Amino acid sequence: MGNQVCTMFGLDAPIFAFSHCRDVVVEASRAGGMGVLGTAGFTPEELEIELNWIDRHVHGKPYGLDLLMPVSYETVRLKPGQPTSALLPDQQVAFVDELLTRHGVPAMPVEESETLRRATLNRFTITPTQHVQILDIAFRHPIKLLVCSLGTPSAETVARARTAGMKLAGLVGSPEHACRQREAGVDLIIAQGSEAGGHTGQISTMVLTPQVVDLVAPMPVLAAGGIASGRQMLAAMALGAAGVWCGSVWLASPQSDAPPEVKQRILSARSSETIVSRSYSGKNSRVLKSAWTDAWAAVDAPPTLPMPLQSLLVKEAMARAQKVRSEPLATYPAGQVIGQITSEISVRQIYHDMILEFADQLEKLHKKYS
């Protein structure tokens, strides 16, 4: 299944697997595609450990790294000895406490809460200074692709990538974003439609992909959002994409480290059971619909906090809910494609099935219209 993207990275199939789980990344790359590790949630020290593990297990296959580079975020500075509670308004804290109490979720000890919040802040690497730390680590590893999400790479980042022989990709949700990424000097564009899980825009994959393809040609484009089968992959290629970027399809796999209650929700959920909400990160993000998202959407709910402060509320709330396995509160970034995920299938099998279905459907179309 050779094409421009396969040649660029030495892939058997142009299927890119985004995940925060190193096991998914390794299995995807070893299956013939490219696994891409999301850095959100790792401290620089933890990321070094993850990349060392990937290097040992990926058997020399190519893999990538996804880095959040938001245009806007809240600068967080704690004074010496100041508790993290000083960063969070009383209104939002009281709202979360009341919501969790209503669902039978007990409070977390103050010391444990403080430790968790500080760890969350350390893991939320979104500032320019933190980007430099992450990039310093990345350039010590044989990473083949660096993906910039929520913003464009700096000229210094582009130059360092060129020197290291690393390709750059920009993840976009609109034609305007694609133009900015192209001008910044990336090598390929990921056009992510509104169906996608996580941070997403307002234009669907079917509409966005051909617009971006035409704008940035001959630069290759990956289609993202609502792709979890060979038929959907074929549709993306018909729109002009050179490959596909998939995320939600791996969530219920044995390799995924998603919480058990989240996996169960994904396997039983309909496509309509995801929602775009600011309640998860402070920015628009498609997540599993739950009592958490419902509460924040209510007319009497307080406003969500900016990134990364909303994450302080979310991480603690979800940790408390997971202790008692509260399925009604369970939320997680997930795309509309979860409606077709009904069984736990390995990453390698998902790759195999997608490629076979792609080839089968392509042959059927050729026979039908030739």
Image (tube, grey):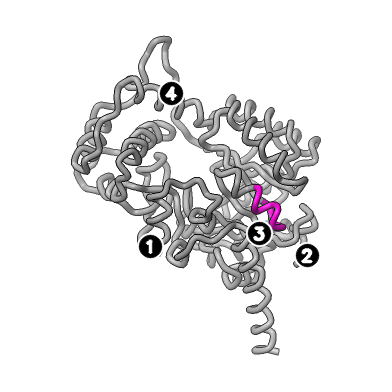
Q: CA distance from mark 3 to mark 2?
A: 12 Å
Instruction: Tell me what residue is drawn at x 52 percent, y 55 percent.
Output: 253
Q: Residues within 10 Å of mark 2 (few under 14, many from 20)?
A: few
Tag 3 near tag 2, CB within 8 Å: no
Q: Amino acid at mark 3?
A: Ile
The magenta segment is 26-34
Would you identify the image quadrant in which residue 44 lies? Answer: top right
Q: Quarter holding the N terminus?
A: bottom right
Image position of 356 with respect to 331: above or below = below
Q: Is residue 30 magenta?
A: yes
Q: Kindly identify the amino acid type of the residue bearing the numbered disc 2.
A: Gly
Numbered circle sitting on residue 268: 1
Q: Is residue 174 visible?
A: no
The answer to which of marks 1 and 4 sits earlier in the sequence is 4
- In the rendered structure, the answer to whether residue 228 lies left or right of residue 309 reads right
Kindly identify the residue that appears in the image at 60 percent across and 70 percent down: 230
Q: Residue at x 36, y 24 (%)?
A: 112
